[in-house]
Amino acid sequence: MSGEVQAAAVLGGLSENEQLDANKPAGGRVRPRRLGLGDWLLPVYTVIAFVFLLIPIAYTFVFSFNDSIKSNISWRGFTFDKWINVCNVEGGAVCEAFANSIVIGLVATVAATVLGTMIAIAIVRYRFRARSAISLLLFLPMATPEVVLGAGLAAQFLAAGVAKDMTTIILAHTMFCISFVVVTVKARVASLDPALEEAGRDLYGSPAQVFWRVTFPLLMPGIAAAALLSFALSFDDFIITNFNSGSVSTFPKYIYISAARGIPAEANVIASAVFIIALVLVVGAQVSRAARQKRLARLG
Amino acid sequence: MAIREFAERGADLELVGIQKRFPGFTAIENLDLKIPAGSFFALLGPSGCGKTTTLRLVAGLEEPTQGRILIGGSDVTSTRAHERPVNTVFQSYALFPHMTIIENVAFGLKRRKIADPMAKAHEALKLVELDHIAQRKPQQLSGGQQQRVALARAIVNRPALLLLDEPLGALDLKLRRQMQLELKAIQEEVGLTFLHVTHDQEEAMTMADTVAVMNKGAIEQMGAPEELYELPRTAFVANFLGQSNLFTGQVVSTTADAITVESAGARIVVPAARAQRHQGEVTVGVRPEKVSLHREAPAADANRNVLAPGRVVDVSFSGVSTQYLVEIPGHGTVMVFAQNIGFGPVAGLGSEVWISWAVEHGFGLEDGPDETRFQDDASTTSLAALHREALVSELEEH
Amino acid sequence: MAFAAFSTAEAQPQAQRKRSPIALFLLLPGIAYLVLFFLTPLVSLILTSLQAPSEFGDIGVYDYAFNWQNYVDVVTLYWPHILRSFGYALVATIAALVISYPLAYFIGVKARRWPLLQSLMLVLVIAPFFISFLLRTLAWKQILSDESFIITSLKALSLMAPDAHFTGTPFAVIFGLTYNFIPFMTLPLYTTLERLDVRYLEAGSDLYANPFHVFRKVTIPLSMPGIVAGTLLTFIPAAGDYVNASRDFLGGPDTQMMGNVIEANFLVLLNYPAAAALSIILMAAILVLVGIYVKRSGTEDLL
């Protein structure tokens, strides 16, 4: 999968990690000494690895300030112009592609989150036939190369005579997001204490009330993580989109097509802005979680 | 000591001026300790007293901030865990989950390239009576079985020194008693030096030749179990190892044989040989099972200490004995254990009683009132708090 | 992780699951969706791969047939691309594993003392995903272009032949694949290493294993689930990728992979049967390889 199984792990992992901390064996805190590489080698390596990981991001960010004319390859001087007039290039093609990506991401996220959450609850809570077949059906989309998913859907749309547009992109994105939603939400459902729902029923809640007042709020962190992941997967998807988009442009597709003649700096502006917003959100969440845990630890 | 050979016999362990600091706290202040070869030595103390750190220092899993560690006379301070002729039975057992039982036991032998590791591993498993499950994985074993495998995995290497880190802590009481006996038998059979770390005073006393009571990073008192119990030198030992009634007062007279302490108007005589200090303000004590309960004022006897009438405030029956708490004005609450020789309690709740004990059973502590670690040593509340702390730490460890 | 998640959750005992019509209501929409937009497309891909050109049609018009000759044709024509796909993916997976393992070890084991640092480093690992991977790949192309500072310096220092290139070479494609999939590798490795009980490592060194042996005999086997998940999450998308190998990105005419020819056949040449046959070959080969790999690595009982 092109985009981001990884983000799946991290976003989905947020809630899971909290559980893990509690279950960590007492000795887990014991620090390992003299194991592995030297005391300084590993930290130094880690710094180098992070620099390596972040170099292209820094490059993209820096070149969003390049006073480029058409292609954005060589440095021609510093300007804020591209950030201010981001939609002025090529008749706003970048912004149009970006807006398409946002719309597709939102719709696909809502659809995949609803469908995936329902499946996750069913899998953890109910018995049904063909369980292993369904598990396989959920697993396979994650184990299939995107190019196969994309070509398969395109072949089907072709056979059915469906014209490719925004709708076909959304249908495709929803499809590959569902499995990731199921994985993410399932972990949360499985960690839910059934006694909480039983307590809700004991306190005269109807099944619907118990679901909406007890189960759903408790599942919310998992569902939110799944939705974030879906959006990230959809927003950054190129390969599947490329097969099913017809003439519709999305942000990644715009970059792919412009790559031959040079990417305008405005694309860097949009990518950098998205990066900064996402980073601030995630770092903020991590820091506030750490602060909360510190407070809890003090109380305990 | 060559790591490639089996130790012929246990080696002695010597810790010289050991200090261990972690960021933010000092685990061990200044520790000197010598454990003779072939002995079963127990390091006893509450959690956080530094006993596990001591063990990890000996194993080579931590480095001392200062001091030296000698095994069999040679300095191993700067050597690493895998270079030391020492093996550990970990509290969590730490059996490798990806290996079978026999692979676990043979692991150390293979690393040391000792000939015929499999046969030796099977022998070790036979010793702990688990050879029939050699091919299983650790997850398939019960707690007691895992403990025995952990023991086999350590002793198969014939280390000069075997470290036991609360290895019985995870077992239930009955299994623990059984394993204590087995461990002791194995130690005698293989003749290794055992260093056993535990917070369970009963376990330390039943198993070890020598017990060292550790508190706040230092050894409070060391000796044979009976000696520690009968003659504790500090309030900490008196209360950590069993329970004690403690009284504080001025020494009012001293003879060659005995000292007399005046505490809240009563005179308590302690044999001079059993008192650590002979003048000034001292704390003296007696074990609850040495104290007798009387319904009437006992006849005066120079060989017995008697405390003024008090009132029974609590009676709890525990089968073999009954525990009374007697409130004596000026002395606080005194604990008395009475053997259930007859039927029913000797004294009912609220009845007036006298208590007495033989002078020879008393002991005088080393620490003065300023140094005592508990504000109100003999009070039931502090005892209860202590007991609760021990339980809580035990629970946390599991 | 994705792969582990399905197997572990099955083993987890839940409060007894009941049979209920609600289950059907919950499952039906999502499963129907996947049948319609995942399973059926695979079937139509198979059908397409067997199509024959329409006798009187234009380019791009095909009739249903049983033309298995398509498979022979694409293998004959594209066997270098097939080999390249799996070769590049394999090398990139190994490179990503070698680069990621120490990183994941540091974050998951060494950094345990500082939970905030640990989670911030984790954010840095996924940070590349907050920015389009096409742009990141293009950034590398420009950073390592023939006129770039790095390449001109290397040439000035005679570490590179004056007429050599970086972009457009197989090395550049593998470099790009490795870079893009490091987070896929690092995260599952981190997940298992974070749970690694260091007491096993201590037990290893207590039993006379030197640091190297502890690593080989204890750390590696205990982190096997992460290694398997990470290598699969890297290998599968890497084998099907066509962005890195594309001429506009890091590749050249001689670095085209299966993804590139599938794309070209489907979207440019409109040779749907060839693209479909190649897709089926790719998918089948991956499923077979993954099956063998998971069996041989013996991770079932570790999960």
Image: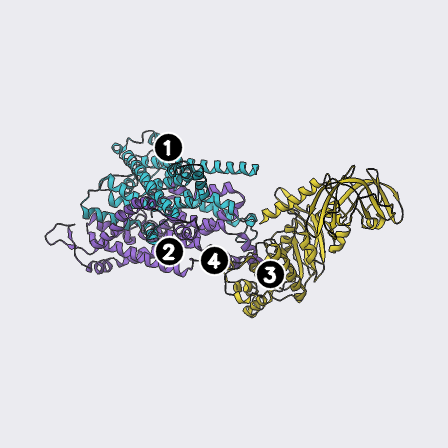
**Is any part of residue B52 visible from this angle?**
yes
**Is any part of residue B60 visible from this angle?**
no
In cyan, which chain?
A
Residues at marks 1 and 3, CA–CA distance in whole angstroms? 70 Å
In purple, which chain?
C
Q: Residue furthest right?
A: B255
Viewer-nearest of labels 4 and 1? 4
Horizontally, is B99 left or right of B325 in the view? left
Vertical relation: B313 (above or below) C238: above
Residue C221 got which mark?
4
Q: Colour of chain B?
A: yellow
Residues at marks 4 and 2, CA–CA distance in whole angstroms? 22 Å
Residues at marks 3 and 2, CA–CA distance in whole angstroms? 44 Å
| Residue that label 2 marks | C91
Badge 3 amino acid: Leu
Disc 4 and disc 1 in contact, CB within 8 angstroms: no
Mark 2: secondary structure: helix
Badge 4 amino acid: Pro
How crowded is the residue under tag 3: few (<14 C-alpha within 10 Å), some, or many (20+)?
A: many
Badge 1 amino acid: Phe
How crowded is the residue under tag 2: few (<14 C-alpha within 10 Å), some, or many (20+)?
A: some
- Identify the subunit bearing mark 1: A
